[in-house]
């Protein structure tokens, strides 16, 4: 018997049966079930062919059944995919990537790619899957990363424990990997325990570290405890630049800075390792961190060398095909400056070169087609540290030639909590612990959006503020009505509604997410009659979510079936009538900036 493939599993751009020389025909992928010599082979129309009785339909290779229907399977199994999750720190959200609408304070803002482009990141996007409505759970780096590595909401962190507040205070210090979160309940442990080599490269930010007793070696061992076989190029926390911090911080003594060459060379070593085991790599560049201080990337490129690392001084510059090909790091770094129009371009160009180097290494080792390369920002940056769309919407691209068609788009809401469920699904692994996310592996086969996913409810958490999006509707509660809340503060600065209770129609009266108008400037609870019941339904959802977190219950909270849809014609008409009110809010916010 020969391997049976259905039509949608066959790459019709390759040559299967068209050659005159039968010796080079790729019989493993011919449609149908064949036996006997080639001379006896009959050819049927694949659209009307029925499998013979001795064939078995299976996701992999058909098994010939014995009379007892029990046989030892000695067939080679399909190779499990390698998995790379790459998460740059504070990556910009460019216009071409479908970013959220402008804030009212900057209505005409544009964010184009650097003049020379970002060709390697664009290759991931255009030759793979682009999530058009991807979200993080929380809009700062540590809280977001907790969700990416665990597939859980950050309020579930064992290090949170409620913190004596209700709702719990979701901040970086309360969302570290402690206890089972580190040793059992995360992606690295799941992959490691199922035959994968696991590696963490770059920024971690998920362990409690004493800056006074820190050593690089002890930090590496701490991260390894969370499921990683290999930990290299480690930045255990954010870089700090202030002199008063440097003088008392053994982690960051000022002898090193951002170093994309160092961490990229360590990632390439993982790719190049000869092994029959697939690998899982969590790769986290420290750049372009700090959108408000982009000149610090220039300082790192100019004032430090490729040999200056958190692990000490390297003996030689890393040689990285596609970056430092000749081993001359400073010459390469000059090309980053040459391609940038200003400091704000430097970090993205540096990251893009790293993506190109990884893709080249995957191609050179024959692993490109069988590697899932997921690229995403850790959170939004306009406004960062808030639960508005600009803080929680992220770019997310997935490149996997063996499993995802080029140019695929999925236009339904997904979250970083779905990454674990999906990557494990592709690898054929059932997680051994409960998670909040769900796999989109099958959903993406429906080009565009998916009705089941369109209406799902996603929750967002930061400090004691909470938000939930169900379909087009978003409900935001701001616990403290002052600048102690990052969301309240950014609402003031950006001209967005920051009342205690806020209800938004993200589709602007239609059924499709609006990227033209920022609908978070207008609180429908204040401006529309009859929506108090809708707000109450959403508050019940948030109460349900909080309760299930407290009870370690992973069942999903669902909206009331009777909940009205606020994205109807009357709501759209209301927004037209209240355009002056929205403009007034913007003017008030801008006056506070002056």
Image (tube, grey):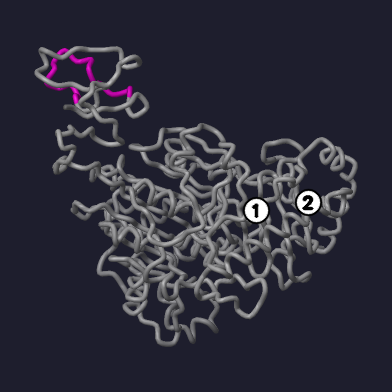
Q: Specify the label residue 548 is tagged with.
A: none
139 or 246: nearer the eye?
A: 139
Q: Using residue 220 as the reference point, say whether residue 593 is left or right of it.
A: right
SS at badge 1: helix
x 70%, y 46%: residue: 561
Between the C-alphas of marks 2 and 1, the distance is 24 Å
State left or right for residue 280 relative to residue 446.
left
The circle drawn on residue 534 is 2
Q: What element carries label 2?
A: helix
Q: Is residue 346 visible?
A: no
Q: Earlier in the sequence, mark 2 or mark 1?
A: 1
- Does residue 94 sit above or below 279 in this rendering? above
Q: Quadrant of the N terminus?
A: top left
Disc 1 designates what residue?
A: 390
Question: In which quadrant is the C terminus drawn?
Answer: bottom right
Q: Does the magenta stretch include residue 13?
A: yes
Left or right: residue 410 versus residue 570 is: left
Callout 1: 10 Å neighbours few (<14), some, many (20+)? Answer: many
Placement of 130 over or under 5, stated as above or below: below
Is residue 506 found inside the magenta-colored segment of the image? Answer: no
- Residue 12 in the image, given as x and y percentages of width and height: 33, 22
Q: How many labels does the image show?
A: 2
**Residue 6 position within the rendered picture, expressed as x and y whole percent measured from the top left:** 33, 26
Residue at 10% from the left image edge and 12% from the top image edge = 39
Q: Percent from the top left, x then y, of residue 188?
A: 36, 62
Magenta: main secondary structure equals loop
In the image, is residue 478 above or below residue 275? Answer: below
Provide the residue span drawn in magenta.
Answer: 12-27
Looking at the image, residue 560 sits to the left or right of residue 232; the answer is right
Can residue 5 be seen here?
yes
């Amino acid at each position: 018997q020969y391997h049976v493939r259905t039509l949608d599993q066959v790459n019709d751009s390759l040559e299967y049966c068209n050659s005159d020389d039968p010796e080079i025909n790729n019989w493993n992928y011919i449609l149908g079930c064949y036996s006997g010599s080639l001379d006896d082979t009959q050819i049927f129309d694949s659209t009307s062919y029925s499998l013979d009785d001795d064939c078995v339909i299976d996701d992999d290779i058909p098994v010939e059944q014995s009379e007892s229907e029990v046989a030892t399977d000695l067939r080679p199994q399909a190779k499990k995919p390698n998995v790379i999750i790459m998460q740059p720190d504070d990556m910009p959200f460019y216009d071409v990537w479908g970013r959220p609408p402008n804030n009212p304070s900057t209505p005409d803002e544009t964010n184009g790619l650097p003049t020379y482009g970002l060709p390697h990141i664009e290759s991931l996007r255009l030759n793979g899957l682009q999530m058009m409505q991807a979200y993080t759970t929380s809009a700062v780096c540590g809280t977001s990363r907790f969700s990416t590595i665990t597939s859980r909401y950050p309020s579930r962190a064992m290090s949170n424990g409620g913190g004596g507040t209700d709702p719990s205070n979701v901040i970086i210090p309360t969302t570290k990997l402690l206890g089972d979160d580190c040793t059992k309940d995360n992606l690295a442990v799941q992959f490691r325990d199922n035959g994968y080599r696991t590696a963490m490269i770059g920024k971690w930010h998920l362990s409690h570290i004493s800056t006074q007793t820190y050593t690089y070696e002890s930090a590496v061992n701490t991260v390894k405890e969370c499921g990683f076989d290999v930990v290299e190029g480690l930045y255990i926390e954010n870089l700090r630049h202030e002199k008063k911090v440097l003088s008392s911080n053994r982690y960051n003594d000022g002898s090193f800075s951002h170093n994309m060459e160092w961490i990229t060379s360590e990632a390439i070593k993982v790719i190049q390792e000869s092994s029959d085991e697939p690998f899982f790599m969590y790769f986290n560049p420290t750049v372009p961190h700090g959108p408000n201080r982009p000149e610090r990337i220039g300082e790192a490129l100019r004032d430090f060398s490729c040999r200056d690392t958190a692990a000490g001084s390297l003996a030689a510059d890393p040689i990285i095909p596609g970056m430092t090909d000749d081993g001359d790091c400073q010459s390469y770094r000059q090309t980053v400056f040459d391609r940038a129009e200003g400091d704000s371009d430097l970090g993205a160009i540096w990251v893009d070169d790293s993506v190109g180097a990884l893709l080249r290494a995957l191609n050179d080792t024959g692993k490109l087609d069988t590697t899932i390369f997921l690229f995403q920002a850790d959170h939004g940056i306009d406004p960062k540290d808030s639960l508005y769309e600009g803080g929680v919407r992220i770019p997310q691209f997935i490149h996997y030639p063996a499993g995802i068609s080029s140019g695929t788009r999925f236009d339904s809401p997904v979250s970083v909590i779905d990454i674990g469920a999906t990557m494990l699904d592709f690898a054929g692994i059932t997680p051994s612990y409960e998670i909040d996310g769900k796999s989109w592996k099958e959903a993406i086969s429906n080009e565009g959006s998916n009705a089941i996913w369109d209406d799902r409810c996603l929750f967002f958490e930061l400090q004691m503020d909470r938000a939930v999006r169900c379909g087009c509707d978003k409900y935001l509660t701001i616990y403290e009505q002052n600048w102690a809340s990052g969301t309240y503060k950014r609402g003031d600065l950006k001209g967005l509604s920051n009342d205690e209770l806020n209800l938004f129609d993200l589709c602007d009266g239609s059924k499709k997410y609006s990227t033209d108008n920022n609908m978070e400037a207008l609180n429908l609870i204040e401006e529309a009659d009859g929506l108090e019941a809708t707000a109450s339904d959403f508050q019940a959802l948030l109460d349900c979510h909080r309760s299930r977190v407290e009870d370690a219950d992973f069942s999903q909270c669902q909206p009331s079936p009777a909940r009205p849809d606020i994205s109807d014609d009357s709501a759209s008409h209301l927004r037209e009538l209240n355009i002056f009110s929205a403009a007034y809010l913007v003017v008030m916010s801008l006056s506070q900036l002056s």
